[in-house]
Image (spheres, rainbow, N blue to C red):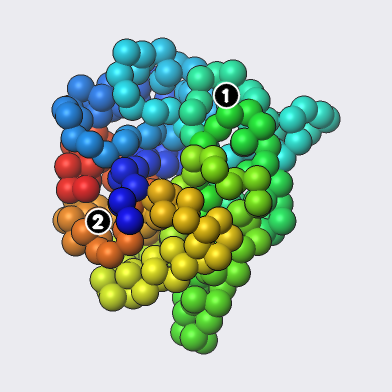
Amino acid sequence: MTAPRPLIAGNWKMNGTAASLAEAKAVAAGRGDHPARVAICPPATLIAQMVWALRGTDVLVGGQDHHWDDAGAFTGDVSAEMLADAGAKVVILGHSERRAGWRESDEMVARKVGAALRAGLEPIVCVGETLEERKAGRALEVVTGQARGSLPAELAGKPFAVAYEPVWAIGTGLTPTTPEIEEMHGAIRATLGELFGAAADSVPILYGGSVKPANAAEILHAAEVGGALVGGASLKADDFLAIVRAA
């Protein structure tokens, strides 16, 4: 099996204004010839500006979410087609903050994945368990169940990534042990194989949850870890580049 090319994606969440584009430019200037793919997902208000700022580089720009319909009376929402029209190439879907705060179900995430594919976007589909679910011994059951419910059949043969984000580790400074990460990523890989057969071997499985320069190398070299979904550390070019170089 050939390992998929690593993907390091930065999720800026609800952070960043036009002044923050300097950090994105610094990432593009400093990434050198490292083989990992690099993506930055800023707020929707910055996508078009970031695409312009990063023109001529290989840093991908992405969205953080979109509606499952292509258009309609959905005040405040954006569609996958709108993100693509602004220049986005990838999109984060099913992030734990969306699942918890907006009660997004696996079915809703799967519909969004379908919309992303229609628009030509590469989805990064997030799965992960809460601390309560892990303590109850249900972590593997919950995460593999989310994967089965959130990854529609039309993903077969299309580029996409899965991001494992233990909800209890996001923004807390806590991280699972390396064996725990490897166990979960292995279970996700097996689930991808059930769903998509041999084609699943090319799908990178990212780890997300308090990834920092200090722990990036250990995490990124664990078995079946094909990259990282980085939150706060992606807001500063120096920190984000340190994680990219650790891949």
First along the sequence among labels 2 and 1: 1
Left or right of residue 160: residue 209: left
Q: Nearer the viewer, residue 34 or 132?
A: 34
For mark 2, what is the residue?
A: 220
**Residue at left 32%, top 35%?**
38
**Residue at left 72%, top 40%?**
68
Residue at the bottom extreme, as displayed: 136
Label 1: few (<14), some (14–19) or many (≥20) C-alpha neighbours in 10 Å: many
Left or right of residue 6: residue 72: right
Distance between the alpha carbons at the discs numbered 2 and 1: 29 Å
In the figure, residue 208 lies in which quadrant?
Answer: bottom left
Q: Nearer the viewer, residue 41 or 204?
A: 204
Mark 1 residue type: Ala
Image coordinates of residue 36 in percent, x first then y, are 26, 39
Image coordinates of residue 35 in percent, x first then y, are 22, 36
Mark 1 falls on what kind of element?
helix
For mark 1, what is the residue?
A: 84
Image coordinates of residue 187 in percent, x first then y, are 45, 71
**Residue at left 71%, top 56%?**
107
Quadrant into which the N terminus falls: bottom left
Image coordinates of residue 98 in percent, x first then y, are 59, 52
Q: Tell me the tag on residue 58.
A: none
Q: Taking the image as drawn, is residue 152 in sight? A: yes
Q: Nearer the viewer, residue 116 or 176?
A: 116
Q: Is residue 108 above or below residue 69?
A: below
Mark 2 falls on what kind of element?
helix
Left or right of residue 74: residue 91: left
Q: Is residue 62 above or below residue 112?
A: above
Residue at the right extreme, as displayed: 73
In the figure, residue 182 lies in which quadrant?
Answer: bottom left
Mark 2 residue type: Leu
Q: Is residue 139 above or below residue 167?
A: below
